[in-house]
Image (cartoon, rainbow, N blue to C red):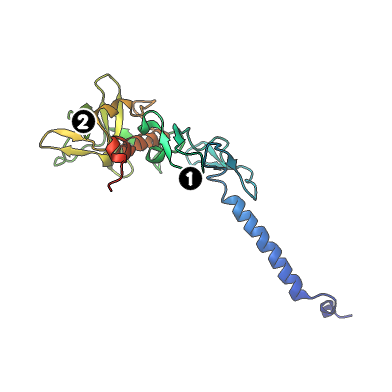
């Protein structure tokens, strides 16, 4: 019997087709499991707040080694979302969440943030902290034609003074100002994202229209006065940006 006689007993084309189907099915299942490394298990809407993993199940955790030390896991062993201080307005799925307490700190809607690494962002080449105050990054300076906000009063949308600008935090990788540090009247300081700030050279004030003057005091504080971590950056941005909706009751009402 010749070597080609096997085709008389097996339909090679059909076997090849079945093998392709089996491979393609395995590929779909593999890719579906891999795309569940972030964002799963899902959190169900409604009062139950159950968790859904779905099928296929979550893959085993994979270890990623960071370039400047440390490791992260995907899926993460911890919950990637901080607790939310809000409750649904109705018991059925999809109903809107109503913040409880200070809405800027509720973690709901625009005040939401992710539990990113509690380490500072770092420069790519040397692995040094990327965002620092100018009192630490002494090799940075403002352009002579740029206004220096240090020493100016920081006011909210209501014109009430919330503190005084004491320093400027610069991004050493992109050479831009990321935050202004505002010292509070009661002591301590907070960071305010620069995109939400307008420096009024006429009135000699720094205006943050997304919040009110009283809101500066409750803003997230830094664990280290000379470093800001990735997690703290998310919390700070969520706090001040959510004031666009939550700072006053009229901002939450529809226009029509």
Q: Mark 1 points at which residue?
A: 94
Residue 129, x across and y down, in percent: 38, 35
| Disc 2 residue crowd, few under 14, some 14–19, many 20+, Cα 10 Å | many
- Taking the image as shown, residue 82 lies to the left or right of residue 179, namely right
Mark seen at residue 3:
none
- Taking the image as shown, residue 100 lies to the left or right of residue 7, namely left
Can you name the residue that lies furthest to the left here? 202
Instruction: Please name the residue shown 53% across and 39% down the image.
Output: 72
**1 vs 187: above or below:** below
Residue 219, x across and y down, in percent: 33, 29
Can you name the residue that lies furthest to the right here? 1
Mark seen at residue 154:
2
Residue sitting nearer the eye, 167 or 32: 32
The disc, 2 or 1, on the residue closer to the chain's N-terminal end is: 1
Corner quadrant of residue 96: top left
Corner quadrant of residue 74: top right
Instruction: Please name the residue shown 75% across and 73% down the image.
Output: 14
Residue 224, x across and y down, in percent: 38, 26
The residue tagged with tag 1: helix, strand or loop? loop
- Taking the image as shown, residue 4 lies to the left or right of residue 222, namely right
């Amino acid at each position: 019997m010749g070597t080609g006689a096997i085709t008389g007993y097996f339909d090679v084309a059909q076997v090849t087709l079945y093998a392709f189907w089996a491979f393609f099915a395995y590929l779909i299942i593999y890719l579906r499991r891999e795309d569940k490394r972030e964002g799963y298990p899902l959190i169900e809407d409604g009062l139950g707040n159950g968790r859904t993993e779905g099928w296929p199940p979550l893959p085993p955790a994979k270890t990623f080694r960071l370039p400047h030390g440390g490791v992260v896991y995907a899926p993460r062993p911890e919950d990637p979302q901080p607790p939310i201080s809000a409750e649904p307005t109705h018991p059925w799925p999809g109903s809107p969440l109503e913040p409880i307490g200070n809405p800027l700190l509720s973690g709901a809607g625009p005040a939401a943030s992710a539990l990113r690494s509690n380490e500072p962002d770092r420069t790519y080449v040397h692995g040094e902290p990327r965002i620092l105050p100018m009192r630490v990054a002494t090799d940075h300076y403002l352009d002579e034609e740029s206004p220096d906000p240090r020493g100016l009063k920081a006011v909210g949308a209501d014109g009430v003074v919330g503190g005084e600008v004491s320093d400027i935090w610069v991004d050493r990788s992109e050479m831009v100002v990321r935050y202004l540090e505002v010292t509070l009247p009661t002591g301590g300081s907070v960071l305010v994202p620069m995109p939400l700030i307008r420096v009024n050279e006429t009135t000699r004030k720094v205006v943050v229209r997304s919040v009110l003057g009283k809101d500066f005091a409750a803003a997230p504080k830094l664990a280290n006065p000379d470093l800001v971590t990735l997690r703290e950056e998310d919390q700070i941005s969520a706090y001040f940006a959510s004031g666009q909706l939550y700072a006053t009751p009229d901002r939450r009402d529809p226009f029509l």
